[in-house]
Amino acid sequence: MSLVNQILRICTVSLAIGLTLLMIRGVPHAHSDATATAVCSAPTDALAGTVWIEQDAAHALMGDPGSVFVDCRSTPEFQSGHIATALSVPSDAPDIATPVARLLGAAKTIVAYCDAASGCESSHRLAARLRELGYPDVRILRDGMPGWLSRGYPAESGACRVCEERL
């Protein structure tokens, strides 16, 4: 079998799996209430050390084993729709689960995001907390989840499977 045929078969199988998962999990959606997508105004001290990442640059990191996306919204918001493969780390949670901390520790780049259009206080809080814990490259996704969805980038819904595992 030629290399081209092998690649075409792999692409076909990948597409079939992706479509099956989309049918099973459903299409994620942005929240319709105005407060969920409102622009947050982070306090000035939370902005110290902020490193932004643009949507296209973040999308380019998808699939990179050295990059991890972290959703800092509440668990129900995460479950209703999040960036594909993202971890759920609510910014108000007192601790980071051990399996999540292990994945973050292996990451070269961490991209935090929320539902605000131009930078949410919860993203800044989580990014600052992660930097304090020693994670060196923590960035905040400009335009958050609404920007991601508006570009049609990969998203999914459901629980964070890794977040609940006990390794």
Image (cartoon, grey):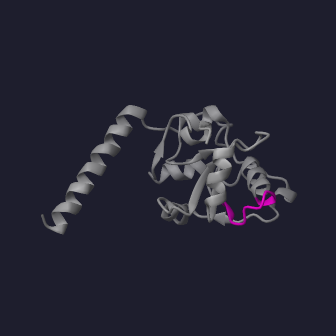
Residue toward you, 51 or 34: 51
32 up-or-down from 5: above or below: above
Residue toward you, 101 or 130: 101
Q: Residue at x 87, y 58 (%)?
A: 45
Residue lying farthest to the front in this orientation: 167
Tell me where residue 13 appears, x and y as whole percent. 26, 49
From this viewpoint, is residue 141 visible?
A: no
50 relative to 152 in the view: left or right: right
77 up-or-down from 134: above or below: above
Q: Residue at x 51, y 34 (%)?
A: 158
Residue lying farthest to the right in this orientation: 45
Q: Locate the C terminus and report the quarter of the image it occupies.
A: top right
Tell me where residue 63 appears, x and y as whole percent. 47, 59
Tell me where residue 92 appears, x and y as whole percent. 77, 40
Tell me where residue 37 appears, x and y as whole percent. 64, 42
Q: Residue at x 59, y 64 (%)?
A: 54
15 relative to 135 in the view: left or right: left
Q: Locate the N terminus and report the quarter of the image it occupies.
A: bottom left
Q: How many marks?
A: 0
63 up-or-down from 163: above or below: below
118 relative to 133 in the view: left or right: left
Q: Which segment did they paint magenta?
A: 131-141
Q: Residue at x 56, y 48 (%)?
A: 86
From this viewpoint, is residue 85 visible?
A: yes
Residue toward you, 69 or 103: 103
